[in-house]
Image: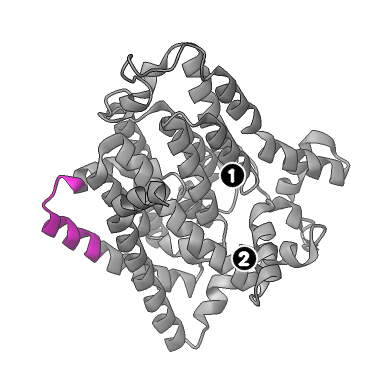
Amino acid sequence: MTDLAAPLRRAAPALLGYAAVRTLGLVVLAVWSAARGKSAHTLLTARWDALWYTRVADLGYGYEVRLPNGDVHSNLAFFPLLPWLERFMHAVSPLSYADGGLLVSLLTSLAAAWGIFAVAEHVYGRRVGVCAVLLWAVLPVGIVQSMAYSESLFTALAAWSLYAVLTGRWVTAGALALFAGLTRPVGLAVVAAVWVAGITSFTGLASRFTGLAPRAEASFVRDRSTAPAPGAQVRPRALGMAIAPLGAAGYVLWVGHRTGKGPLGYLDVQAGWRNGFDGGAAFARFVGDKFTSFPSALAGVGLIVGVGLVLWLYVVGVRQGQPLPLLVYTGVVTALALCASSYFGSKPRLLMPAFPLLLPLALALARLRTSRSAWVVGGVAVASAVYGAFWLNGSGPP
């Protein structure tokens, strides 16, 4: 317990700030929903993907919806870890599957916040860690962190896996990557980070992990007097790399076997949802279509600015010397989000796990006086809470 108490005390300001922001968002959502005659609880637990997850938890796989245009929406598209946890919560408590999913999301959002703090503190220091967590909390689509969705669960697993990589805990990193691969298809980003980290360290290029980040070097280039003997970590590193892809690969192969379509069967399932990877062509057409009339052209400009900001933050992260595992992870998450042909309204929440994009902003925020940064975060938190309530009562996250 003492081993856990000290890190928890260090993370306490970040976690308390995160809880305050999320509580504000839920309060505003409750008031807004009540004013519109809607249930905030239903919005959080029983719409869009949350319904698909609870159906898997309740009935297992095999449910599908055939649309008039011939598309087939199969619940095989949804990875199993969240439904498993919903089923567990239902088995050990009086909670429904939906409420079990909500509780999982609330708990893992705190775990995700702690993981983000741990990564940012390790690389840039405690103050930046706190700022990174608060920025993640006040994202415009941050309300998804409190829904019965898998984003919070995945981000928690990804953040702690990356932290384990940065601190040389290879088996832990691989195990968490395995579970991340059972949560969402983008679990491949965590696997890629673990593999690149392992390969780089095997080839003796560990200094590439550090770049200019002042604290990252500590985990890879330690005092020679206390460094382990050469090859001492070869076995755990190889084991971590070996187990990392088993979650994603296992589920994809199981879907292929179940559908009778072989290793690529999961791609057929996603195609039924009109999901695929087209290099961003469909998204580019979607943005281009916004310029066919004046009102929608403003939305088109906003989309271009938003994508430009994401890419700019990634480039700044490279220039600031973020550790290589973070850059690999963020690059894969961003590429899959922006270059997929999935529903375009989903892209903001698909980018949510790419928390290292926030590190340049966290560095800038940390340089401000505490009072000024508090006003900035507070103002953005209010705007985020209002937008989240408006969004969830409207089009919401698909």
Tell me if residue 307 can be seen: no
314 versus 324 height, above or below? below
Q: Earlier in the sequence, mark 2 or mark 1?
A: 2
Residue pictured at 60% horizontal, 49% vertical = 342
Tell me if residue 110 can be seen: yes
Residue nearer the viewer, 37 or 109: 109
The residue beneath circle 2 is 50
Left or right? Give the position of 213 relative to 53: left
Residue 378 on the magenta span: yes
Residue pictured at 50% horizontal, 56% vertical = 152
Q: Main secondary structure of the magenta part?
A: helix
The local crowd at label 2, few if under 14, some if 14 to 19, many if 20 or more residues have their Cα within 10 Å, is many
Which range is magenta? 366-379
Q: What's under tag 1, amino acid-wise? A: Ala
The residue beneath circle 1 is 180
The part of the image, by quadrant, that contains residue 176 is top right
Counting from the top left corner in percent of width and height, residue 48 is at 61, 66
Quarter of the image that includes the C terminus: bottom right
